[in-house]
Amino acid sequence: MSKFSRNTPDQQRSWSRHASHYDKVFLDPYGPAVRNPLWAQLDAVEDAGSKTAADLGCGTGPLIKPLLERFGRVVALDFAPGMLAKARERLAPEDRDRVTFLQRPMEELEDLAGSLDVAVAVNSLVMPDVRRIHHVLTAIHATLRPGGVFMGVAPSMDAIQYHTMLLHEQALDRGLDPAEAEQFAALHGEHRYYDFAFGRFQFQGLRQKFWQPFEFDHRFKKAGFRSVALDRVLYPWDENFVGADEFAAEPPSWDWFFRAEA
């Protein structure tokens, strides 16, 4: 067990506690109105039926079925037992022998070294300690076969700042003075949950890392990846966003999609 793993029991309990209503608390990157580059990238994997993919930080398991529809075998890993229990409930009996469930932190991947063709991490590369993110990225790199790829979604800090800008201008347009407009934007942008300087988020016991775009190239190459490309997961303006009705004509909010080559 790594020194980082010893610090995760409280997060295991927090994430397990949220398992039953996870989809109501966090933005859903799989929603029908969401533009998610993940699907096209998974479809582009050649001869996927003979390959193994891993869902790292699988949560309640919404990605497991789409992976099974494309790949021959799937590894589903999460450190929260409550999340894994929900993920197992999604699995059809005929698919059980094609999925391996692992309860462990994401950096404990030594037994998977060189065994994966594709690794996917959707909103799970969120450890608030960036030292641990480095260990996780290094461990994932080691699991990939030559030519393997790592792809996924990471929450965007700059999208929070974009929403803040829109809220601020909305308040100014309504006649609030600058100080009042800033208070309005901070309140409805839920700034109390964010540390913008270091890209951290904390809510009801959960602690997460939010990403700026310039971090991906730096952190992934430091962990050994040859390249990393970014795209955006685009979310519709809906009830998840304060002021959404007035922002309908504005470009949508986003999270970051990444694809890295081993």
Image: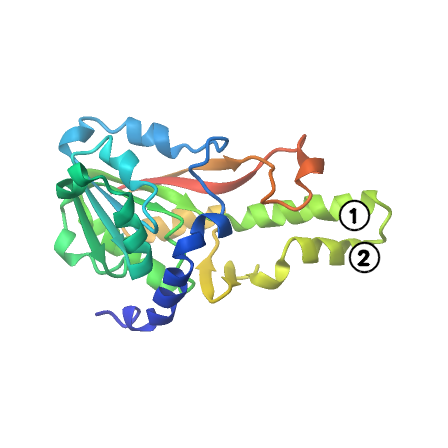
In the displayed structure image, the side of residue 166 where residue 94 appears, left or right: left
Image quadrant where one finds the N terminus: bottom left
Q: Position of residue 207 (x, y in %)?
A: 46, 63
Identify residue type, mark 1: Ala
Which label sits on residue 171? 1
Q: Are marks 1 and 2 in contact (CB under 8 Å)?
A: yes
Foreground of the two, 246 or 13: 13
Q: Disc 1 and disc 2: Cα gap in Å?
A: 8 Å
Q: Residue at x 78, y 53 (%)?
A: 181
Q: Earlier in the sequence, mark 1 or mark 2?
A: 1
Which label sits on residue 232? none
* 10 Å crowding of disc 2: few (<14), some (14-19), many (20+): some
Q: Position of residue 226 (x, y in %)?
A: 29, 42
Q: Report helix, strand or loop for mark 1.
A: helix
Q: Position of residue 164 (x, y in %)?
A: 66, 49
In the displayed structure image, the side of residue 98 where residue 85 appears, left or right: right
In the displayed structure image, the side of residue 189 where residue 102 appears, left or right: left
Q: Position of residue 39 (x, y in %)?
A: 36, 31
Q: Residue at x 57, y 62 (%)?
A: 193
Image quadrant where one finds the C terminus: top left
Q: Is residue 235 above or below residue 126?
A: above
Observer able to see residue 80: no
Q: How many marks?
A: 2
Identify residue type, mark 2: Glu
Q: Give the quadrant of residue 245.
A: top right
Observer able to see residue 184: yes
Q: Is residue 239 above or below residue 4?
A: above
Q: Residue at x 63, y 57 (%)?
A: 190
Q: Is residue 95 above or below residue 83?
A: above
Which label sits on residue 180? 2
* 10 Å crowding of disc 1: few (<14), some (14-19), many (20+): some
